[in-house]
Image (spheres, rainbow, N blue to C red):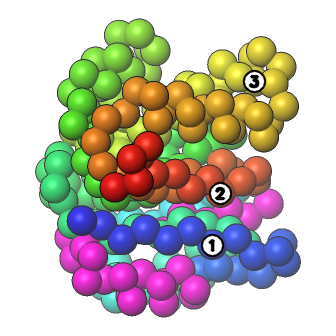
Amino acid sequence: MCGILGLLLADEDAHVNQMLFDGLTVLQHRGQDAAGIVTSEHGRLHLRKDNGLVKDVFQTHHMIDLRGNFGLGHVRYPTAGSSSCAEAQPLYTNYPHGVCVAHNGNLTNAADLADYCRNKLGRHINTDSDSEVLLNIFADSLIKGENNGSDMVENIFSAVEKVMSLCKGGYAGMYLINGIALVGFRDPHGI
């Protein structure tokens, strides 16, 4: 079980860092293993994550660096993978655009999907986290849509559809596409 939170402010000069911190503090009961926040500020991502409670992971100097008008937050209770800091979320891949994921749930076919990502998509999987699989399948689908000249909105929905068609289990989460969008998703059964 994990807690996830995504915020987008209309004012591009506003900052979501304190709201994400406050929201994660309220969601702390959903996960005490690790916490993380990523924000987007004028096309630049700012990320802080570590093992521990929200109040311990984010000190004042970290909060000052988490600038931007939209972002994701995550508190983790590991049910898959390990308790490694590398598996703390949000997870990030730089291509395309800089895409991040915060995820709750379990993929029942995660091992098969990790092989698919490595062998069919040529994507590097660095952890045992099923969240990393969700991230890489989505990012790869975005790239393919952009290469086909698709409209960005259509491309985003197509990428989510690809994730839903491949990933089995009970899950929900959010993607942050740097400078473009926040996208919420859940498994096709709504579990």
Give the residue type that dot 3 points to.
Answer: Glu
Give the residue type that dot 2 points to.
Answer: Leu
- Residue 38 at x, y = what percent? 54, 64
Left or right: 77, with 132 as reference point: left
Could you tell me how far apart the alpha carbons at marks 2 and 3 are, in whole angstroms? 18 Å
- Residue 60 at x, y = what percent? 49, 89
The answer to which of marks 2 and 3 sits earlier in the sequence is 3
- Callout 2: few (<14), some (14-19), or many (20+) C-alpha neighbours within 10 Å? some
- For the residue labelled by badge 2, is the local secondary structure a helix, a strand or a loop? strand
On screen, residue 84 above or below 72: above
Q: Which residue is mark 2?
A: 182
Indicate whether residue 19 is drawn in magenta.
yes
Q: Quadrant of the N terminus?
A: bottom left
Left or right: 182, with 129 as reference point: right
On screen, residue 68 above or below 170: below
Q: Which residue is mark 1?
A: 7
- Residue 91 visible in image: no
Indicate the quadrant where residue 109 lies. top left
Q: Quadrant of the C terminus?
A: bottom left
Indicate the quadrant where residue 155 lies. top right
The answer to which of marks 1 and 3 sits earlier in the sequence is 1
Q: Which residue is mark 3?
A: 146
- Residue 96 at x, y = what percent? 65, 33
Indicate the quadrant where residue 98 lies. top right
What is the magenta range?
A: 18-43
